[in-house]
């Protein structure tokens, strides 16, 4: 039993990890065929994973309602919304144009999504206020760069200060791009390190707590 719960998943991860890492560097028709076949299996597994995720979601919210935990009313709203959308989807026959499902998506879901994103603007403004206070030399540089970029992005800024648009473009194309590439390199190295740890069984959190 321990073999199937611990050893087999580690061996499978090791085998598949090494295989598909090597597959990326092997320009052979058999290698491409293997990747295509596994991609199909990945889609099948994703479908079952969605069912598992929905089941887990239903179970967790059901337990919250049953125990009358804090915020259990929102769980009830989630169940009601899920049933309404499922019913509208089945009733519409999978179509969206001119159906109740399309109406719910366009005028309820999209509207709520827009509301959530609009609220993010206030959090961004609050974070910018805290970050842009010039308490250190680094914060001062950040503040000056932010002012120049915001000033050069509006027509009024170019009208009042000639050439501010060129300064803004230089900041976005040179220092900003360099910082983005540095972050991307760091994230890539971190992803490679994490992948190696998972492939060779050093990182085993995916096996669960038991």
Image: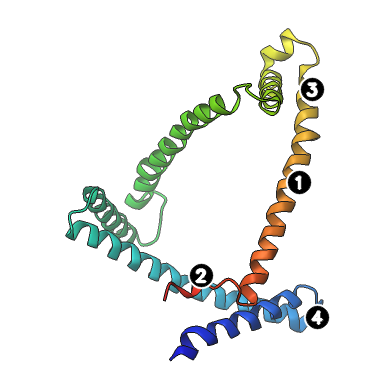
User: Could you tell me which residue is drawn at 65 percent across and 77 percent down?
Assistant: 200
User: Tag 3, which secondary structure?
Assistant: helix
Disc 3 to disc 2: CB gap under 8 Å: no
Mark 3, Cα crowd under 10 Å, few <14 / some 14-19 / many 20+, is some
- From the image, tell me which residue sits under label 4: 28
Disc 1 to disc 3: CB gap under 8 Å: no
Q: In front: 189, or 80?
A: 189
- From the image, tell me which residue sits under label 3: 167
Task: Give the mark nearest the N terminus, 1 or 4.
Answer: 4
Residue 88 screen position, x and y as percent: 30, 56
User: Could you tell me which residue is drawn at 80 percent across and 80 percent down?
Assistant: 28
Of badges 4 and 2, the one in the foreground is 2
- From the image, tell me which residue sits under label 1: 181
Of badges 2 and 1, the one in the foreground is 2
Mark 4, Cα crowd under 10 Å, few <14 / some 14-19 / many 20+, is few
Task: Give the mark nearest the N terminus, 2 or 1.
Answer: 1
User: Tag 4, which secondary structure?
Assistant: loop
Answer left or right for 78 relative to 136: left
Q: How many marks?
A: 4
Asked where in the image residue 9 lies, by quadrant, the reply is: bottom right
Residue 174 screen position, x and y as percent: 81, 34
Residue 100 screen position, x and y as percent: 32, 50
User: Tag 2, which secondary structure?
Assistant: helix
Q: In front: 54, or 202?
A: 202
Disc 2 to disc 1: CB gap under 8 Å: no
Q: Alpha carbon of mark 3 to alpha carbon of mark 2: how far? A: 48 Å
- Is 133 rendered above or below residue 75? above
């Amino acid at each position: 039993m321990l073999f199937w719960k611990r050893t087999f998943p580690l061996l499978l991860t090791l085998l598949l990890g090494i295989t598909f890492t090597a597959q990326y560097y092997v320009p052979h028709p058999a290698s491409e065929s293997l990747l295509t076949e596994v991609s199909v299996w990945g889609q099948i597994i994703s479908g079952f994973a969605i069912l598992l995720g929905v089941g887990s979601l239903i179970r967790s919210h059901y337990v919250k309602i049953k125990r009358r935990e804090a915020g259990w009313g929102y769980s009830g709203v989630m169940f009601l919304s899920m049933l309404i959308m499922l019913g509208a989807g089945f009733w519409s026959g999978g179509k969206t144009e001119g159906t109740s499902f399309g109406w719910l998506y366009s005028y309820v879901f999209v509207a709520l999504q827009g509301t959530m994103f609009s609220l993010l603007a206030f959090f961004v403004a609050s974070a910018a206020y805290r970050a842009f206070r010039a308490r250190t030399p680094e914060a001062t540089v950040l503040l000056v760069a932010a002012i120049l970029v915001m000033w050069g992005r509006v027509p009024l800024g170019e009208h009042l200060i000639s050439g501010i648009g060129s300064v803004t473009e230089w900041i976005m194309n040179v220092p900003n791009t360099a910082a983005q590439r540095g972050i991307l390199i760091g994230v890539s190295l971190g992803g490679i390190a994490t992948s190696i740890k998972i492939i060779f069984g050093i990182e085993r959190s995916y096996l669960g707590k038991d």
